Amino acid sequence: MLPCGQTPCVRNVRVFRAVLGNRDLRRVELAYAGFNAAEWAVWIAMLVYAYERGGTNEASLVAVLQLAPAALCAPFLALLADRHRPVRVLLGGYVAQAAGMGATAVAILTDAPVPFVYAGAVVAATAVTITRPAQAVIVPSLARSAEELTATNVVSSWVEGGGVLAASALTGVLLVVAGVDLVFALMAGVVLVSALLMTGVDGPEPAASEAGAGGRSEVLAGFGALREHSHLRLLMGLLMGEFLIWGAMDVLFVVLALDVLALGQGWVGYLNAAFGAGGIIGGVAAMALVGRLRLAPPIATGVLAFGGALVLIALWPSALAAVVLLVLSGAGRTVLDVGCRTLLQRTTPADVLGRVFGLLEGLTMAGLALGALLIPPLVALGGSKAAVVGSGLLLPALGILMARRLIAVDRAAKVPVVEIALLRSMPLFAPLPAPAIEGLARALELVQLPAGTVVVRMGEEGDRFYAIAEGEVEVSRDGAMVACLGRAAGFGEIALLEDVPRTATVTALTDVFLYALEKGPFVTAVTGHAPAAQAAGALVSKRREELARLTADGTSGG
């Protein structure tokens, strides 16, 4: 619930002001906006270039040429921000992207051999994988408060969602006005500006050099989990179907604009923009999935919307219908993705959850690459319209084959609705994505204690976080009461996040119902997702400030 007098509009203004008021965060977000625009613009432009040279065969090949090295290098490049200064890593990634884009522009302008053109695009696409892991490490060290950090997370999500829409539309205009070479040249300049913005940012020191050890074994362990649990293979298979069609969409946009609809180059960008707009709408709709008892119906709806819209475009081709239906398709893909990931979270054993989701990230890039290869044989077999229809039917057909098993898995999944509602009301967990909140809720253990019981004692080793479901507790230091906490409050996080002894004593004032979360699941869940990791970093700073105030005037909690 918003504080009194704060409308959503007022809240959004406060979010922007919080981020813009921090010089370093402002520079990081502006740099990220430039990166996001360039990432989408050059991807679209390169597919158009390849399609005009060799049709769907070459467009698909070029998509794979860019995605395959990125998929192979991403896990290793992600370790750079742990082993070196993250700001320098991020700046270096931007410079590498700009160099690849610039080289591609020069190669096209000078009519260089085609391999040189594609080589620059591959360098740029591979360097893109550096950005998000490095930024996830940098942002928590720059935020001055938990509110500021949460505001940055919101702005980043706006940048990503709006970037697809804006960059796709702008690319459509640039392709009509100038050409592919100008798109690459301009985007190289944009990313260089992003690099310049990062030169004035001071970030954290690198983590321990051994932070990335064991990455290969974790990936192999993820495959082992798939072998042991059939329902994980089912959900991964459905997600792979999504990734295949999503990867095929990049080539399909070119086919639709230039062949099926005969609208010209610019419409490749416009169709991308329509799909991106649908993704934003789907993201809003997917919020309703949090805590929902059954996910099979929305997953089925997402499957039909994502694939069925493509079939309708091919059967009744027109510019207006294509735009509307692609908005529907983009919304369906987002609902499908969120639904499947949430169900995967609900049904995956806690001890393999991190490995399974790590494997999923690698499969995403592989699926996108394979999807790009899907279109040429479909075009060769039946023509452009048949390729669009075939792509649209693939995912619904896969869904029909998996329907009975999916419903069974969905029914067997326990949904901790009460626990989810409690965690969502707590500031510590509010920034977490829906699947992470549900995963935490599933790991909670109910603890009932009578009045007068000491729950945690100052100086003891911390092993649990506690959320208050009912009743009140007293927080004290050295025998002096400093706070009373009630429902939806929590305590114990400092000891877990900083690995220090308990900073206060907490005693039950009334009979209390608490939900306890062991240290391992708490730390893993909170730090295992980008927004959650950022929130955890800010929380340490916030709690330390509270402890400092406690020493001065006795107003902090434990």
Image (spheres, helix red, strand yellow):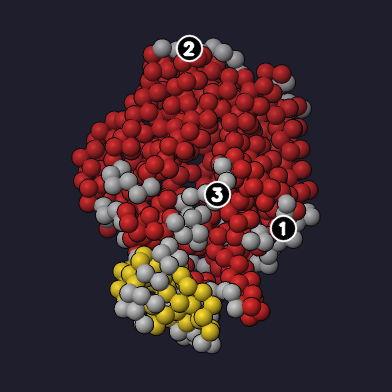
> Could one spot residue 405 in this view of the protein?
yes
Could you give the CA–CA distance between mark 2 and mark 3, rounded to whole angstroms?
A: 48 Å
Judged by depth in the image, the label closer to the viewer, 1 or 2, is 2
Q: Amino acid at mark 1?
A: Arg
Mark 1 vs mark 2: which is more N-terminal? 1
Find the residue positioned furthest to the front.
Answer: 4
Q: Mark 2 and 3 residues: CB-CB less than 8 Å, in contact? A: no
Q: Amino acid at mark 3?
A: Cys
The label number, if any, that marks residue 88 in the structure image: 1
Residue 359: image location, x then y, percent: 42, 53
Could you give the CA–CA distance between mark 3 and mark 1, rounded to whole angstroms?
A: 43 Å
Relative height, residue 413 to residue 50 (above, below): below
Judged by depth in the image, the label closer to the viewer, 2 or 3, is 3
Relative height, residue 241 to residue 533 (above, below): above
Q: Residues within 10 Å of mark 1 (few under 14, many from 20)?
A: some
Q: Amino acid at mark 2?
A: Ser
Q: Label 2, on which residue?
A: 318
Q: Label 3, on which residue?
A: 4
Instruction: Identify the residue at image location x=57%, y=65%.
Output: 539
Q: Residues within 10 Å of mark 2 (few under 14, many from 20)?
A: some
Could you give the CA–CA distance between mark 1 and mark 2, rounded to whole angstroms?
A: 48 Å
